[in-house]
Amino acid sequence: MGSESNIKLLDENGIRLDGRTPEQLRPIKIETNLLERADGSAYIEWGGNKIMVAVYGPREAYPKHTQDIEKAVVKARYNMAAFSVDERKRPGPDRRSVEISKVISEALSSAIMVEQFPRAQIDVFIEVMQADAGTRIAGLTAASVAVASAGIPMRDMVVGCTAGKVEGKVVLDLSKEEDNFGQADLPIAVLSKSKRIVLIQMDGDLSLEEFEQASGMIMKATDNIAEIQRNALINRYSVESIGDGE
Ligand code: ADP
């Protein structure tokens, strides 16, 4: 973010390097239940991001001191595979992945009916196999589908998107180049029906006006992404019912 470059991110018509208009999303595809051992799972491709999410639980929280007598604890673990980026990433947790795991856990806790499962834990493993900017939001959006596919009661789905600023213009869903060489990156996730914000972070700087424009674009985009989430879950159930009796 913010590093100066000679790369031109927008052409004279405001079109981006990958051919998108300022308010256009990258292609998004979500599938559920690809993993047999997990209680729920989802796979998302969002632009060049490829992320698998596995959910286990609710089950008794362990170690015991992590139990909450009033509600389930959501333990999300975000991990980037060594081969997910251009240069091999050092395996294992780092400050960034610990932070992302924490904000994703909190966002999911707002959506899951955690009060129904005192002393339990819900594990959410987010494995980034290919990273292309916006992985925390893509991971969280897929995690919400994976939790729903596990049959865990939720009051709402979590859905997110990023926006940012490149060459002085506000654009939706930053690509890798835009993230690297742009002036701001604003990931936001909301509860899809109520639009309550459950995750918001920012790199770089935006004026209040730009912030309002960026967050407005994100809010609009979340309706489309929520539709993709719903379709992924509907497909799963329709496939299951076709399989019945076979
Ligand atoms: P997000 O993926 O949520 O946008 P960041 O803004 O921190 O999170 O990262 C932006 C992008 O930078 C990532 O999607 C990934 O493509 C790349 N990236 C992050 N960490 C590393 C790393 N350790 N090595 C190489 N590339 C990385």
Image: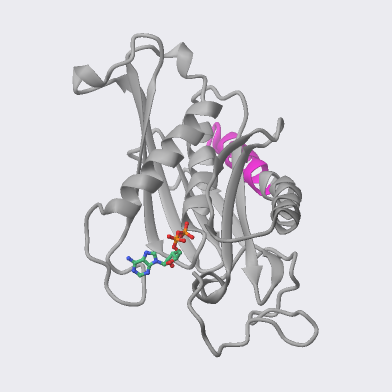
- Which residue: 25% across, 21% down? 66
Find the magenta span and give its range.
228-246
Nearest the viewer among 210 and 128 is 210
Pick out the residue farthest to the right. 13
Task: Name the foreground residue: 139 vs 189.
Answer: 189
Instruction: Decide if residue 90 is on the left or right side of residue 131.
Output: left
Extreme residue in the front direction? 207
Q: Quadrant of residue 171?
A: bottom right
* Vertical placement of residue 177 versus 150, above or below: below
Please give the name of the residue rendered at 69% of the width and 47% of the height, measured from the top-left corner: 222
Residue at 49% over, 64% down: 49
Q: Is 8 one of the magenta-colored residues?
A: no
> In the rendered image of this protein, does residue 125 appear above or below residue 11?
above
Q: Identify the residue at horizontal 36%, vertical 71% (top origin).
A: 85
Viewer can see residue 35: no
Query: Residue 179 or 124: which is nearer the viewer?
Result: 179
In the image: residue 155, left or right of residue 152: right
Residue 62 appears anywhere in the view: yes
Which percent across, then down, holds residue 32? 51, 45
Q: How far across and down, in percent of the image, does residue 174 sit?
A: 59, 66
Q: Is residue 111 above or below residue 163?
A: above
